[in-house]
Amino acid sequence: MPFGGLGFGELVLIFAVLLLLFGAKRLPELASGMGRGIRDFKRAVNGMDENSIQANQNTTNAVQAAPATTAIPAAPAAPAQQVPVTVASEAPARQDA
């Protein structure tokens, strides 16, 4: 049951009624209009308008078009002092007689 309790037969019946009401030529136009409406609604909910979308695309294109620069190696750091590491030896095993 793909659509919340509607089976395959019900979906075919709904599609057939829509096809009879609107015709085969009009259904793709309705679907694309509905898709545009949903996309606009999501953008409005997220607070994005056409200006922010174009600004985002322009910054993305500018970042991709920026020439690659070669990394300049950093100056070697001062040599680190070596600290001797001591390992604590285990206590000798206790031998009870």
Image (cartoon, helix red, strand yellow):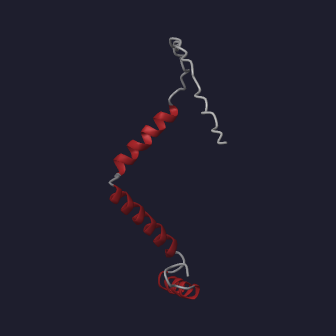
Residue 10 vertical position relative to residue 86 in the rendered view, above or below:
below
**Is 18 in front, or is 4?**
4
**Is 30 in front, or is 61?**
61
Query: Residue sitting at 53 percent across and 87 percent down?
Result: 10
Task: Classify residue 47 by image quadrant.
Answer: bottom left
Where is the N terminus found, in terms of image quarters? bottom right
Task: Classify residue 71 by image quadrant.
Answer: top right
Residue 64 vertical position relative to residue 31 in the rendered view, above or below:
above
**Is 32 in front, or is 75?**
75
Residue 51: give x, y in percent of width and height: 34, 47
Left or right of 73? Residue 36 is left
Query: Residue sitting at 43 percent across and 69 percent down?
Result: 34
Left or right of 51? Residue 76 is right
Query: Residue sitting at 56 percent across and 18 percent down?
Result: 84
Where is the C terminus found, in terms of image quarters? top right
Residue 81: give x, y in percent of width and height: 52, 13
Residue 19 vertical position relative to residue 97 in the rendered view, above or below:
below
Residue 78: give x, y in percent of width and height: 50, 11
Residue 56: give x, y in percent of width and height: 41, 43
